């Protein structure tokens, strides 16, 4: 799998241009931004990391997580995601174009992984909730593989919620934060793919994830992590770290602290990323940044060397594509 397969460059550039327009429209006045504590460990101490689009990213002195600080208020972010130009490009252009490819290359793999992981941990799959279910693709494929499973999607977008319902998924048409108490203790597995990095405040969100789980059930989150290879190499030049969308790029240590604060006693990680080395190669960093060793592998390297390096990153949990598993007990 290549970066281009799941994120075609032209539509990705169009999306980023719309984000830049939204920033000019909505967040020109930086005095409207608010200072926050580390979104992972809640410590205040931080050091500057880099500036981007007029915003500042910092690293936490305690857990090394990378985060946007100061950041837009919750109301400002909600406005960006509901009425911004970028949200329109995302819903109308980016998401539909990439969804089919994602289904083939990512979703079935995730469903199989969930089945294996749940079986290994003795977690039943009677009810599975997916937060930010989009078109409902993950739950739809899960239901196809396991027809008995009750699938619940949380999706604030009206047309996406409609599409999910048409696939036989129960949909709560709202943001997860507004899902009612009646969902407490109802779910064996709650999944949340590529949402954590966007959240204004991840802590209450994860706490709520813990509350909807019953028995020995588990949470499965995926996110972009700052310990990963491509993030460490490209840092502020990384195209996938941009405000006001990707604002929590947590370290593994930060994610563990966050999950434990939220009530998950047992936290595990895998970083099964396939794209780190490809992302670095596509960014064409200069040789000085890579150093002679990596420059030799990445710029002049053979495909099998690239693949071997990626494989090693996965083994070392040094891919930036992080999967977090939390169980309460
Ligand atoms: Zn921290």
Image (cartoon, rainbow, N blue to C red):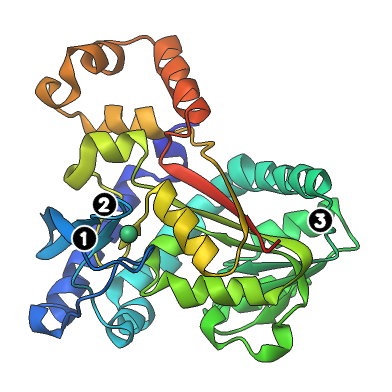
Q: Nearer the viewer, mark 3 or mark 2?
A: 3
Sequence-wise, the earlier of marks 1 and 3 is: 1
Q: Which residue is mark 3?
A: 123
Q: Is residue 107 left or right of residue 295?
A: right
Q: Is residue 30 left or right of residue 5?
A: left
Q: Position of residue 90 (x, y in %)?
A: 40, 65
Q: With respect to residue 157, does 197 lie above or below?
A: above
Foreground: 132 or 114? 114
Q: Identify the image quadrant of residue 152.
A: bottom right
Label for residue 65?
Answer: none
Foreground: 98 or 147? 147
Q: Which residue is mark 1?
A: 17
Q: Residue at x 32, y 11 (%)?
A: 301
> How many residues crowd mark 3 within 10 Å: few (<14), some (14–19), many (20+)?
some
**CA–CA distance in space, label 3 to label 2:** 41 Å
Label 3 SS:
loop
Q: Position of residue 226 (x, y in %)?
A: 33, 46
Q: Residue at x 71, y 82 (%)?
A: 184
How many tags in the picture?
3
Determine contact: label 2, label 1, CB under 8 Å.
yes
Q: Which residue is mark 2?
A: 13
Q: Is residue 313 left or right of residue 111?
A: left
**CA–CA distance in space, label 1 to label 3:** 43 Å
Q: Residue at x 74, y 54 (%)?
A: 141
Sequence-wise, the earlier of marks 3 and 2 is: 2
């Amino acid at each position: 799998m290549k970066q281009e397969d799941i994120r075609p460059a032209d539509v990705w550039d169009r999306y980023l241009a719309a984000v830049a327009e939204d920033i000019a429209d909505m967040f020109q006045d930086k005095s409207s931004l608010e200072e926050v504590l580390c979104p992972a460990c809640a410590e205040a101490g931080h050091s500057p990391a880099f500036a981007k689009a007029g915003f500042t990213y910092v690293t936490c002195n305690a857990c090394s997580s990378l985060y946007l600080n100061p950041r837009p208020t919750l109301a400002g972010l909600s406005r960006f995601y509901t009425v911004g130009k970028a949200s329109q490009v995302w819903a109308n252009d980016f998401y539909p174009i990439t969804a089919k490819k994602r289904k083939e290359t990512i979703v079935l793999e995730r469903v199989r992984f969930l089945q294996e992981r749940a079986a290994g941990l003795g977690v039943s799959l009677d009810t599975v909730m997916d937060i930010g279910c989009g078109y409902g693709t993950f739950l739809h494929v899960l239901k196809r593989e396991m027809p008995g499973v009750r699938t619940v999607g949380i999706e604030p977008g009206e047309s996406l919620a409609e599409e999910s319902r048409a696939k036989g998924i129960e949909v709560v048409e709202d943001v997860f934060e507004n899902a009612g108490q009646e969902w407490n203790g109802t779910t064996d597995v709650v999944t949340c793919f590529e949402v954590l990095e966007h959240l204004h405040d991840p802590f209450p969100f994860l706490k709520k994830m813990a509350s909807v789980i019953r028995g020995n059930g588990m949470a499965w989150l995926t996110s972009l992590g700052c310990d990963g290879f491509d993030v460490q190499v490209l840092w502020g030049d990384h195209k996938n770290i941009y405000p006001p969308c990707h604002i929590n790029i947590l370290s593994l240590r930060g994610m563990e602290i966050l999950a434990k604060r939220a009530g998950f006693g047992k936290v595990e990680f895998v970083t099964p990323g396939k794209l780190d080395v490809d992302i670095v190669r596509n960014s064409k960093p200069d040789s000085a940044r890579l150093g002679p060793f990596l420059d030799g592998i990445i710029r002049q390297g053979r495909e099998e060397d690239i693949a071997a390096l990626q494989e090693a990153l996965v083994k070392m949990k040094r891919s930036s594509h992080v999967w977090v598993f939390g169980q309460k007990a």
